[in-house]
Image (spheres, grey):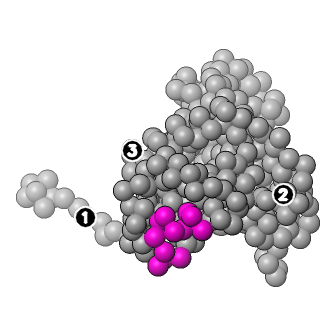
């Protein structure tokens, strides 16, 4: 039981949004879907849920297309836009109407409102809800049909610390009970604490996919060298992953200092400093792979220089 995205491509005019995207979300696991703004995450999720059609490729859910599922609203829970609800309806009316469409009973409505912490605002109109409460409403709608799959686009957006902690525990329990989760988020440190797998997309192409433990369990080294490009190429020949470090001319390398030093010696590359890293983080790994269509520039140009006169203090 899985979600399979196979060789999916999508273009709008001359702009390619997705380029042969393939990955799998497995039963009982939480898959984190990561990428910069404009990288194709939301488009992929819309194709999975049949709201957008791929030009090439296919998506299957338990071997079937979304439209081929009997009553898909009960098989796959979706949260793609927390604001996609009629602003004039109450919280209860919104969930109750959805329950009638998918054939869930009234008792299920009361259950999800309670679990999602919405009982106290059940009579409130959607337009008056905070962003965090709208996210909870979206999650209530996604979970209404007791689905086998959850596809959630930025569900933690707007949640407070308590809400994020609750979401983490909720999804972990759901997956432990056999559910399949695909979740996108920019909260990388938070995702790192509970996802089982990651898929990273950059400019419409998958640049990494695999178990989170395979990324975070490596011993790492911080290396400074006058020739970082040469060392990176030498390491790549041995299938050793490296990414730019936090200091000019440095690399973070997923290998022990001994392995890095031996590789540099064999290649005739000078190393000026090498230390054992504290282990890789998802954020560091992610930044080493992605560039982003809307990457920001150097912020220092926004601020005037302020020279402090040591004698006068200004």
Q: Which residues are magenta?
A: 86-97
Comparing 234 with 64, the one in front is 64
Q: Residues within 10 Å of mark 2 (few under 14, many from 20)?
A: few
Give coordinates of residue 176: x percent, y percent.
Answer: 65, 31
Which quadrant would the C terminus be assigned to in this image? bottom left
The quadrant in which residue 244 appears is: top right
Q: Which tag, 2 or 1, sits closer to the chain's start?
A: 2
Mark 1 touches mark 3? (CB < 8 Å): no
Mark 2 touches mark 1? (CB < 8 Å): no
* Residue shown at 89% from the left, 70% from the top: 55
Residue 13 is left or right of residue 284, and the answer is right
* Residue shown at 51% from the left, 68% from the top: 93
Q: At numbered mark 2, what does the secondary structure look like: helix, strand or loop?
A: loop
Residue 4 is left or right of residue 212, and the answer is right
Q: At numbered mark 1, what does the secondary structure look like: helix, strand or loop?
A: loop
Total residue callouts: 3
Q: Which tag, 3 or 2, sits closer to the chain's start?
A: 2
Comparing 53 with 125, the one in front is 125
What numbered label is drawn on residue 70?
A: 2
Residue annotated with mark 3: 162
89 drawn magenta: yes
**Distance from the alpha carbon under mark 1 to that under mark 3:** 40 Å
**Distance from the alpha carbon under mark 3 to that under mark 2:** 36 Å
99 drawn magenta: no
What numbered label is drawn on residue 285?
A: none
Residue annotated with mark 1: 306
Mark 3 touches mark 2? (CB < 8 Å): no
Give coordinates of residue 239: x percent, y percent.
Answer: 80, 32
Which quadrant would the N terminus be assigned to in this image? top right
């Amino acid at each position: 039981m899985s979600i399979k995205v196979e060789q999916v491509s999508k273009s709008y005019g001359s702009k390619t949004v997705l380029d042969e995207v393939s990955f799998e979300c497995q039963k009982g696991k939480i898959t984190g879907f990561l990428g910069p703004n404009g990288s194709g995450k939301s488009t992929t999720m819309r194709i999975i849920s049949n709201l957008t059609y791929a030009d090439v490729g296919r998506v299957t859910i338990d071997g079937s297309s979304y439209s081929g599922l009997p009553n898909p609203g009960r098989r796959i829970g979706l949260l793609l836009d927390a604001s996609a609800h009629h602003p004039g309806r109450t919280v209860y009316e919104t969930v109750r109407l959805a329950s009638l469409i998918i054939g869930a009973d009234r008792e299920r409505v009361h259950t999800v409102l309670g679990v999602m912490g919405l009982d106290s605002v059940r009579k409130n109109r959607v337009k008056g809800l905070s962003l965090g409460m709208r996210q909870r409403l979206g999650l209530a709608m996604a979970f209404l049909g007791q689905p086998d799959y959850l596809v959630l686009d930025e569900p933690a957006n707007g949640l407070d610390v308590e809400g994020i902690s609750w979401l983490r525990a909720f999804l972990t329990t759901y997956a432990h009970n056999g559910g399949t989760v695909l979740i996108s988020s920019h909260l990388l440190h938070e995702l790192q604490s509970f996802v089982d797998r990651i898929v990273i997309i950059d400019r419409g192409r998958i640049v990494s996919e695999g178990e989170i433990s395979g990324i975070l369990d490596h011993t790492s080294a911080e290396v400074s060298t006058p020739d970082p490009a040469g060392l990176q190429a030498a390491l790549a020949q041995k299938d050793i992953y490296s990414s730019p470090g936090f200091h000019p001319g440095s690399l973070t390398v997923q290998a022990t200092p001994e392995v890095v030093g031996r590789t540099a010696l064999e290649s005739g590359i000078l190393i000026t400093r090498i230390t054992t890293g504290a282990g890789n983080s998802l954020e560091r790994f992610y930044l080493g792979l992605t560039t982003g269509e809307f990457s920001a520039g150097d912020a220092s140009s926004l601020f005037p220089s302020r020279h402090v006169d040591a004698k006068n203090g200004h």
